[in-house]
Image: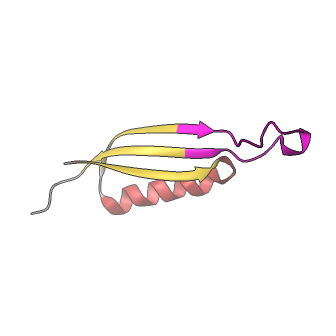
């Protein structure tokens, strides 16, 4: 049975997001079919020089296969 798992974070926390996804994959036993991502810049990122390094939102969608229950 195919399922979807969504992960959301910001680009300044990529290492934490990676650990979260890897931990989920190990614990769930899911067979990952595909991972699709999107990076959306902050609306304040272009507001001026003080916001040049504003965090951007990251959304990852994992499509995976898991055995149906019993």
**Number of disc labels:** 0
Q: Main secondary structure of the magenta part?
A: loop
Residue 3 at x, y = what percent?
Answer: 28, 49
Residue 20 at x, y = what percent?
Answer: 50, 59
With 7 as the anchor, is 25 left or right in this view? left
Residue located 62% across and 39% down the image: 40
With 61 as the anchor, is 29 left or right in this view? left
**Quadrant in the rendering for residue 56:** top right
Quadrant location of the C terminus in the rendered image: bottom left
Residue in the foreground of this view, choosing between 15 and 61: 61
Residue 16 at x, y = what percent?
Answer: 59, 57
Q: Is residue 67 above or below residue 50?
A: below
Residue 66 at x, y = what percent?
Answer: 23, 52
**Quadrant in the rendering for residue 34:** top left
Residue located 72% across and 41% down the image: 43
- Is residue 5 found inside the magenta-colored segment of the image? no
Colouring mode (rainbow / by chain / secondary structure / one colour): secondary structure
Residue in the foreground of this view, choosing between 56 and 35: 56
Q: Name the residue at the left extreme.
A: 70
With 48 as the anchor, is 63 left or right in this view? left
Residue located 60% across and 38% down the image: 39
Q: Is residue 52 above or below residue 21?
A: above
Residue in the foreground of this view, choosing between 66 and 10: 10
Residue located 80% across and 36% down the image: 46
What residue span does the magenta drawing correspond to? 38-58
């Amino acid at each position: 049975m195919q399922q979807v798992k969504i992960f959301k974070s910001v680009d300044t926390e990529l290492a934490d997001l990676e650990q979260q996804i890897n931990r989920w994959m190990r614990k769930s036993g899911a067979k990952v079919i595909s991972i699709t991502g999107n990076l959306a810049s902050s609306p304040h990122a272009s507001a001026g020089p003080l916001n040049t390094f504003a965090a951007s939102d990251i959304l990852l969608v994992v499509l995976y296969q898991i055995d149906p229950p019993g």
